[in-house]
Image (cartoon, coloured by chain):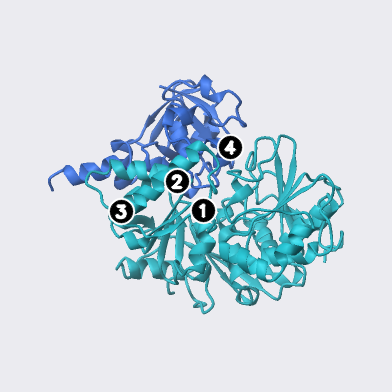
Chain colours: A cyan, B blue
Amino acid sequence: MCPTRAVNILSSKCGRKGARPGDIVDAPVDRAMIHDNNAALVIENFGRIAGASVWSPDKAVFFIDHHSPSTSVKAVKHHSLMRRFARENGIKSFFDCGWGISHVVMIEQGLAAPGEIVVGTDSHTTGEGALGAFATGIGATEMAAVLATGRVWLKVPETVKILLNGVLPPGVYARDVMTAVLGRLGPEGANYRSVEFQGSAADAMSQDDRIVCCVMSMEMGAKNAMFVSHADPDAEYERTEEFDASSMTPMAALPGLPTNVAPLSEIEGRGIKIDQAFIGSCAGGLMVDIETAAKVLKGGRVAEGVRLLVIPATRHIYEESLKRGYMEILHGAGAVIGSPACGGCGGHDAGILAEGEVCIANSPRNMGGRMGAGGVVYLANSATVAASALSGRITGEKGGDAL
Amino acid sequence: MSRCWKLGDNVSTDEILPFQYMVLTDPSELGRHILGSVKPGFAEQLTRGDVLVAGLNFGYGSSREHAPLALKGAGIGAVVARSFARIFFRNCINIGLPAIVCSAAVDGICEGDSIGIGLQSGVIQNETSGARYAFAPFPPFIMEYVENGGLINTLNKRNSDPV
């Protein structure tokens, strides 16, 4: 049996022919992404490494996307620290406020090419695997060491194949596929593992859909995630999880865990009132999401008492949405449009919830306190979030008709 | 001996340290805010060296190193769990906070029990109940990180030691 794609990338990059799952390899890093949520700790730790200099300034990429534009005195101090560090160390790839979310910009800018090893100080770095990079999240101290040495130790992972057969019905999105996958595999169903997406429904997915799947794989603990179109059928998978895309329906996650899932049809009947609807993040602020939201909201008006927050993931998506007239539709429907950033997803800047408030979002997470202490978050596809903003209650596309 | 505090499954980094404290970097300042929504007033009840005993997938979610750093800053001496989320585990080791996988200990330990942890021997001794729980000791390169107090100290030590 031959190795899976992740094992192949690691063994060839590390010069360890025949490396097997469980082996520890010392991997050379092709790209190191650092964002403003963790940069201060990275820079502080880098300063503690005796005699350190940045191993390869052209391979380090800085982003200000979590507290953007600066959200507090402390946050802007960290931003200043990042700008100075980048200047002093010759780091040219600096994506300042307004560029957007690292994972999506990295893909737009060709900073996560197939076969590359990408590490980022963000768990959703798995999203950069959409085009075939081996991309994984690490912490701040480890990133300081990567900046100094250009290397990171990795345990060669086992691989879980997610086989998506059939064709997705209209009104069912990549996000619903992932909600179904997360519901079956659970919050550590792919912990420490590489995830490969295959099958006819996977092959049919757009780049945006692939980003959604790779980002959301983190919510089942994936070390990395990727789409592999010409996979060897005999590759050595730990297991295969097979799904029939043709029979899938819109899904949602109940507050607490993104893996706490139910068919939307079961939740709709409960008449859950919402205070906020959020369309944004690395899994929900993509072109496809803005387009879907605009289609649902066209000619409509956000319900009384509901805030609809729309944050395009990147400056490029913002610009394209303006050109296509989506922003006019969203604005006309009463949406609040934010500048490209992580936004409400992590509660870092725009869209923090009050205690007792309910939000429906297409972002990746809904753990306790995620968007603000005492607020609760339901997760669903973009059409559901937009339709819920119109009705003021958790509702599917077309006013309650799930399809 | 260390006093134990018990937690459930899938405790996320959002719960260990909520987003509003991510602009802090000082461990003891971070430590004042740990697990506020799960165990209100928790940080004030801790004694240096106390141990968290958690269920499955402890540290689920974001890569924020602030979470384990806050636990360390609050005085937590080790975390024992049935399993850890991948990045959280690496972060613990990289800052020199032992993260030990031992389901038997999670089953056997009650909140308030006093334990001793033998990192080299791979044994947790429950002084309260008398029980002993075995776990697989860290491989040598991880043990080196833990013993040196983290990754940065290890790098510096390696670079200064004549080979």
Q: In the image, residue B100 lies at what x, y percent?
A: 43, 39
Element marked by disc 2: helix
Tags 1 and 4 touching, CB below 8 Å: no
Q: Dots 1 and 2: beta carbons under 8 Å?
A: yes
- Would you call the spot at circle 4 few (<14 residues within 10 Å), some (14-19), or many (20 or more)? many
User: In the current view of this chain or complex, which residue is farthest to the bottom?
Assistant: A230
Amino acid bearing label 4: Glu
- Sequence-first disc among 2 and 3: 2
Count of numbered labels shown in the rendering: 4
Instruction: Assess disc 3: are there few (<14), some (14-19) or many (≥20) residues with their C-alpha within 10 Å of its C-alpha.
Output: some
Nearer the camera: disc 1 or disc 4: 1
Crowding at dot 2, Cα within 10 Å, few <14 / some 14-19 / many 20+, comes out as: many
Snapshot quadrant of residue A301: bottom right
Q: Which residue is mark 1?
A: A97
Seen from this angle, which residue lies furthest left? B162
Do marks 1 and 4 both belong to one polypeptide chain? Answer: no
Residue marked by disc 2: A79
Q: Secondary structure at mark 1?
A: loop
Measure the alpha-carbon separation of dots 1 and 2: 9 Å
Q: Amino acid at mark 1?
A: Cys
For disc 4, the chain is B
Tag 2: residue type? His
Which numbered mark, 4 or 3, is in the foreground of this view?
3
Q: Which residue is mark 4?
A: B15
Mark 4 or 2, closer to the camera: 2
Pointer 3: what residue? A89
Instruction: Give the CA distance from mark 2 to mark 3.
Output: 15 Å
Q: Residue shown at 54%/62% (left/top)?
A: A104
